[in-house]
Image: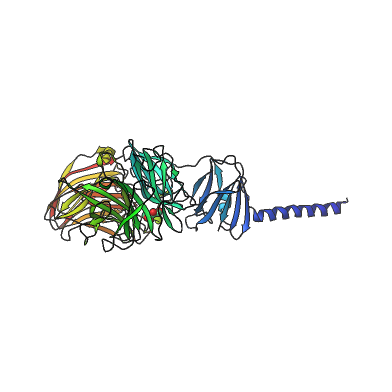
């Protein structure tokens, strides 16, 4: 071969190699542990080589949801919707690959352009870092380690352990892919994260529901089984069950799911409890804008009993997440039934909220004793999906709410996780002017959070009384306790504020007979026009008012008069409110026993 021919051949060989490489790479991205094949029209296959514990997927929250199918030896074993990064990476979410060690794993991706950055950013790893990255993450309220959370689900107490399950998206910090996440506690204030309890299946994703302890083995899964009832949600909503024979560690789905179906589109959130008087299980379901009651002797076969709701209470949206409990009336030997009814939208300040009805329940019908009234359980904007623990000790009825609002829950300024729960509250009833109301008292376990207490102070306020830096060494997690005695003031108020001029204004307007919290200048509020509102509660004509105020990194929960008044609101200050200032309008008042506790 002469030099000319040699150069020509070399040139063609070089061109051939470049061409081949180019053509391969044009439909196949370079990311070594993966073989990525783009198939056109947004479809791609990613084959995984050198499998590790997690596939870490890059998420961009502004991206639309892409559909992913996880395939093991040609069978689809899981599918999920993920907002895969197209232009930038907000964070990573892990797909757990363990349990498939001997299989060939691949993923089928749909609806993602070949040019998206996710192809270069996805990784395999044996670890996923869950260390907290959020300044707004509460210290003593439950939050998921990462990902999205909404309603508390399946709350049940057994053998000294409080179980909390919850609506969970492990593949992003926005709503989707509903699973039941799981956490346990022995004291209601410190929580241990547990593996996901119930994952989606061919019947759908896992919507809200409840658990019972089947002490007498009525369902036949075993005495003491924890049985979970949840809504399988796909195009239609149907009720399903799963049981745990290891105290809630793992659940097995009942093979004959679903156990209850309907032609109604909104048919969900089963709350099951044992009704002593009729010796039956009762299931309450949220169906459109009413609650339906079913009964059963074996937890598997359910008989329709009645519906409740038409013309009663608020109807600005669908009814969701019911609960039905019998509660004692303070100062009497009497009990009444309370139907908790979460509603979205249609809450008193827009979006979601918890209403309730007081009345009788005979195992068939719930009768509301005050059909003309609408009663709200909490007068803040961030108190939803409230339900109580099943089988709680000492006959307690302990409630927990999701501390957000559907109007902006997906937009709040956190990314590693979204949303926490309220503090636990013990429910009871009290009577005022012949009407029976729900009282939500902070559960006694919250006292164990109290660290150092500031000395008790008493003072009179007739104009502005600035206790600058009183809360200065606080990290934004504290409880304030005080008793206010009115001396002809028209407005009794105080502001919690920080050095950045961010504040919440909390006041009694005694002329308008309301208690209010204004978070318009509380910090970050611009993520939703529905966020910076004033929430207010009607108040009784009191001369003396007791307040307990729980402040955490991104929430304020106010309890007046041991829970007759409850107000729960989120806040996102750029630094903790470490100052407080009292003011009076048109008269004066005294504050006695003012005390601040750091909460650990
Ligand atoms: C209430 C709710 C429930 C449903 C769940 C879905 O917040 O809409 O009715 O089961 O959330 O995540």
Tally of numbered discs? 0
Q: In the image, what residue occupies the spot 46% across and 46% down?
A: 255
Work out which residue is located at the far right of the displayed protein and give it.
2
Image vertical order of residue 124 relative to residue 294, above or below = above
> Looking at the figure, which quarter contains the C terminus?
top left
Question: Is residue 191 shown to the viewer in this render?
Answer: no
Locate residue 41 relative to residue 129 in the image: left or right.
right
Locate residue 420 relative to residue 463 in the image: left or right.
right
Residue 566, given in percent of the width and then of the height, sits at 24, 51
Please name whichever residue, 353 or 534, is drawn nearer the observer in this view of the structure: 353
Ligand 1 shows up in the quarter that is bottom left
Please name whichever residue, 543 or 591, is drawn nearer the observer in this view of the structure: 543
Q: Quadrant of residue 162?
A: top left
Work out which residue is located at the far top of the displayed protein and give it.
159
Residue 571, given in percent of the width and then of the height, sits at 32, 52
Q: Quadrant of residue 41?
A: bottom right
Looking at the picture, the colour scheme in use is rainbow
Locate residue 365 relative to residue 204 in the image: left or right.
left
Question: Is residue 449 shown to the viewer in this render?
Answer: yes
Image vertical order of residue 130 relative to residue 522, above or below = above
Residue 339, given in percent of the width and then of the height, sits at 27, 53
Q: In the image, what residue occupies the spot 28% across and 63% down?
A: 310
Locate residue 119 relative to residue 328 in the image: left or right.
right
């Amino acid at each position: 071969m002469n030099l000319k021919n040699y150069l020509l051949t070399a040139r063609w060989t070089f061109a051939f190699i470049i061409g081949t490489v180019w053509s391969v790479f044009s439909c196949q991205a370079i990311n070594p542990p993966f073989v990525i094949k783009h198939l056109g029209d947004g479809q791609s296959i990613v084959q995984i080589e050198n499998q590790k514990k997690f596939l870490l997927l890059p998420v961009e929250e502004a991206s639309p949801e892409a559909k992913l199918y996880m395939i093991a030896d040609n069978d689809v074993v899981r599918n999920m919707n993920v907002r895969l990064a197209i232009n930038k990476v907000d964070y990573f979410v892990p797909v757990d690959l363990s349990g498939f060690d001997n299989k060939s794993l691949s993923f089928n991706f749909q609806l993602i352009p070949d040019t998206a950055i996710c192809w270069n950013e996805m990784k395999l790893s044996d670890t996923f870092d869950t260390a907290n990255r959020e300044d707004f993450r509460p210290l003593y309220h439950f939050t998921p380690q990462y990902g999205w959370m909404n309603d508390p689900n399946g709350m049940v107490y057994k053998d000294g352990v409080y179980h909390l399950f919850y609506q969970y998206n492990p593949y992003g910090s926005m709503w989707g892919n509903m699973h039941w996440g799981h956490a346990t506690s022995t004291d209601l204030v410190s929580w241990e994260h547990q593996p996901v309890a119930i994952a989606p299946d061919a019947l759908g994703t896992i919507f809200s529901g409840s658990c019972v302890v089947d002490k007498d083995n009525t369902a036949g899964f075993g005495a003491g089984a924890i049985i979970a009832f949840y809504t399988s949600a796909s195009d239609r909503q149907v009720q399903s069950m799963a049981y745990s024979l290891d105290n809630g560690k793992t659940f097995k789905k009942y093979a004959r799911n679903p156990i209850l179906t309907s032609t109604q589109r909104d048919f969900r959130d089963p709350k099951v409890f044992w009704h002593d008087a009729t010796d039956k299980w009762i299931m309450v379901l949220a169906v459109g804008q009413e609650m339906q009651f079913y009964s059963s002797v074996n937890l598997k076969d359910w008989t329709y009993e009645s519906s409740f709701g038409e013309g009663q209470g608020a109807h600005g949206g669908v009814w969701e997440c019911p609960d039905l409990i019998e509660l004692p009336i303070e100062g009497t030997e009497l009990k009444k039934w309370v139907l908790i009814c979460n509603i979205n939208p249609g809450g008193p300040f827009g979006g979601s909220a918890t209403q309730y009805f007081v009345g009788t329940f005979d195992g068939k019908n719930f009768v509301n004793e005050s059909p003309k009234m609408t009663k709200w359980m909490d007068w803040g904007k961030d108190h939803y999906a409230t339900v109580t623990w099943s089988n709680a000790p000492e006959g307690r009825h302990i409630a927990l709410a999701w501390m957000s609002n559907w109007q902006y829950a997906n937009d709040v300024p956190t990314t590693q996780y979204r949303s926490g729960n309220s503090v636990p509250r013990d429910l009871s009833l009290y009577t005022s002017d012949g009407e029976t109301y729900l009282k939500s008292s902070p559960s006694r376990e919250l006292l164990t959070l109290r660290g150092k207490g500031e000395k008790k102070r008493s003072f009179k306020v007739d104009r502005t009384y600035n206790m600058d830096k009183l809360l200065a060494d606080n990290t934004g997690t504290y409880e304030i306790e005080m008793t206010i005695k009115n001396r002809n003031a028209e407005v009794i108020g105080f502001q919690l504020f920080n050095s950045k001029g961010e504040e919440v204004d909390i006041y009694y307007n005694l002329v308008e007979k309301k208690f209010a919290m204004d978070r318009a200048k509380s910090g970050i509020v611009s993520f939703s026009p529905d966020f910076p509102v004033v929430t207010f509660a009607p108040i009784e004509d009191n001369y003396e008012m007791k307040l307990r105020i729980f402040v955490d990194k991104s929430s304020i929960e106010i309890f007046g008069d041991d829970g007759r008044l409850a107000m729960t609101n989120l806040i996102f200050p750029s630094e903790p409110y470490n100052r407080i200032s009292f003011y009076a309008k048109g008269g004066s008042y005294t504050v006695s026993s003012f005390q601040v506790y750091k909460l650990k």
